[in-house]
Amino acid sequence: MKSKLFFLGAAGMLFFQTGFGQTRPNIIIILADDAGNADFGFQGCKDLPTPNIDAIAKDGVIFRDAHVSSTVSAPSRAGLMTGRYQQRFGFECNDGNGYTGLNTSETFIAGELKKAGYATAAFGKWHLGEKETQHPNQRGFDYFYGFIAGSRSYFYRPDKDDKPGNKNQLLENDKPVRFDGYLTDVLAEKAVSFIHSHQKKPFFIYWAPNAVHTPLEATSEDLQRFSGHPRQKLAAMTYALDRGVGKIVSKLKASGLYNNTLIFFLSDNGGAHNNQSSNLPLKGFKGNEYEGGHRVPFVVSWPAKIQGNRHFDGLSSSLDIFPSCLEAAGKLAHTGKPLDGVSLIPYLTGASEGSPHEQLFWRKDQDASARVGDFKLIRVNQLGFRMYNLKNNLQETEDLSQKQPEQFEKMKKNMQQWESHMMKPLWTEGAVWDTITLMIHDDLFHNRDVRVKEPQQLKKFNK
Ligand code: CA
C-alpha cells in the first residue's frame, strides 16, 4: 500500500532521535473548542497568528484527513475520552432534553493511564456529565481545574457563571474557586504548575480550554493588538489560546521534558457559525454532517519518537487518541470495552503504512454520514441522501448518488451495518434545534447559502 506520509523537508531528519530511552512519555491532549479548520497558521491561515501551535505542528505530523467523532462538543469529547463511538452508549447529542451525561460503565483514557502510574489532570471544559459520579476526579483525573458544563465567561463572574451551584462555575477539584484575569491564561498557568510539581513521574494532561467558543471575550490588550482586524475578537481569543500553548511548551522545554512528551492538538468540532471562525475550503460548520462539521486541525508531536515536519493523509479519528496513548505509555492492555480507534503510533513511526481507517461514521439524532475510502455519504432523515467523492470534490457540491448507484448502495449498506451496532440516543437536542439543523442541511444539500443558523434567526424567519 502506498505510504500516506509526506516529508516536508530533509531538515526534519536531523532531529529524529531513535534512542528515546526507557522512560515513558508524558502525554498532553490540547483540545480547542469550536476552532475553525482554517484558523491556524499550520493549516494555511494568514490572518490569525498562532506561532506556538505552529511550532508544535512543525515538530510533529500534521494530519490532513482527521476527524472528530461528532460535530458538537459533548459527544465529541465522549468519543475522544472513551475511544469508542459515543453512539454505542447513547451519548449522541449535546446536552438537551433528558441529558444524563456519560455512563460510568465506560472506561476513560485518564483512568487507564492513572492505573499505569501516570499523574493525571484535566483543565478547562468538561461537558461529560454533571453528576458527582461523573466528575473528572471520579473518572481518572487526580486533579481538575475547570468547569463542568459547556460554556462560560472568560472572566470571573460571581453574579452569573460563578454563582454558587452554577454548573459552569470554576472549580478546583470539587471546590468553587475565584480566579483573576483571563481564563485561557489561568488554565495555562495551572497546567504549568502541574507540570512543575509532577516532573518525577509521567503525567497525562487533558488541556481543554473553552477557547474559542462563545462568548467572544478577550483581554483589552489582545483586542487592542488586533484593532481594525475584520475578525478582531476571534483573532484576540486565538492569540490567547496560542499564548497558553506557548507557556505549556516553554515549561516542558525548560524542564527538559519536551522531546519525550506526546502532544495531540485538535479542535473538538468544526468552526461554529457564531464565533467568526472559518472552515474554508470545507463546506458546513459545527453541528452538521458536512466536512466543516467534523474534519478538524489535528497534530501529533513526539520529537523523541516520531519524526516531525511531515504531513499524514491517512483517514484518522479522534477515537484513535485513546489507543495511541495506551501504546505510547508502554503498550498497556485496555481493560474496558472494545475500542473503535486504532493506535496512530505505528503509522507515524513507519511500522504501518496506509490508512488507520477504511471507513468512519457519524450520527447525531436525525442526521448521519459515512466515509468509505474517498467517498462520503450524508443522510438526513426527512431529506434523503447525498454522496460525494472527496478526492476531487472536497467541497461536497456534486452529488453522485444517482451517477454511481453501486457505490451508493454499498455506502448505504455499510452505514446500516454500523448503525445496527449502535443504540438510540439517550437524549436529543430538542425540536427547535432539530428544525434548524434540518433547514441547514436542506440548504447545504442544495448548495445554497444557509438561511437560519440559530434559534433567534428562526424566530425572525418564521415571522
Ligand atoms: Ca465545541
Image: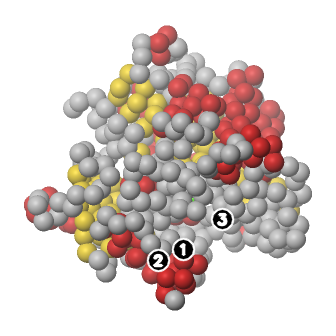
Identify whether 38 is placed above or below 215: above
Q: Which residue is mark 3?
A: 150
Please tell me whether mark 1 sits on a helix, a strand or a loop: loop
**Which residue position holds label 2?**
436
Q: Is residue 120 above or below residue 93?
A: above
At which x and y percent is residue 286?
Answer: 49, 61
Label at residue 308: none
Query: Crowding near pointer 2: few (<14 within 10 Å), some, many (20+)?
Result: some
Count residues near mark 3 (Cα–Cα under 10 Å), then give few for <14, some for 14-19, many for 20+: some
Pointer 2 with pointer 1, Cβ within 8 A: yes
Q: CA distance from mark 2 to mark 1?
A: 7 Å
Amino acid type indicated by mark 3 = Gly
Element at badge 3? loop
Q: Residue at horizontal 47%, vertical 65%?
A: 287
Ligand 1 within 8 Å of the CB at mark 3:
yes
- Label 2, label 3: how far apart the Cα atoms are: 20 Å
Q: Residue at x 52, y 14 (%)?
A: 15
Q: Which quarter of the figure is the N terminus placed in?
A: top left
Return the residue found at the far front.
Answer: 228
Q: Residue at x 75, y 23 (%)?
A: 255
Which residue corresponds to the image point at 55% horizontal and 21% vertical from the top-left? 304
Q: Are marks 1 and 3 in contact (CB under 8 Å)?
A: no
Which label belongs to residue 454?
1
- Residues 255 and 82: in front is 255
Can you name the residue that lies furthest to the top here? Answer: 14
What amino acid is labelled 1 in the image? Glu
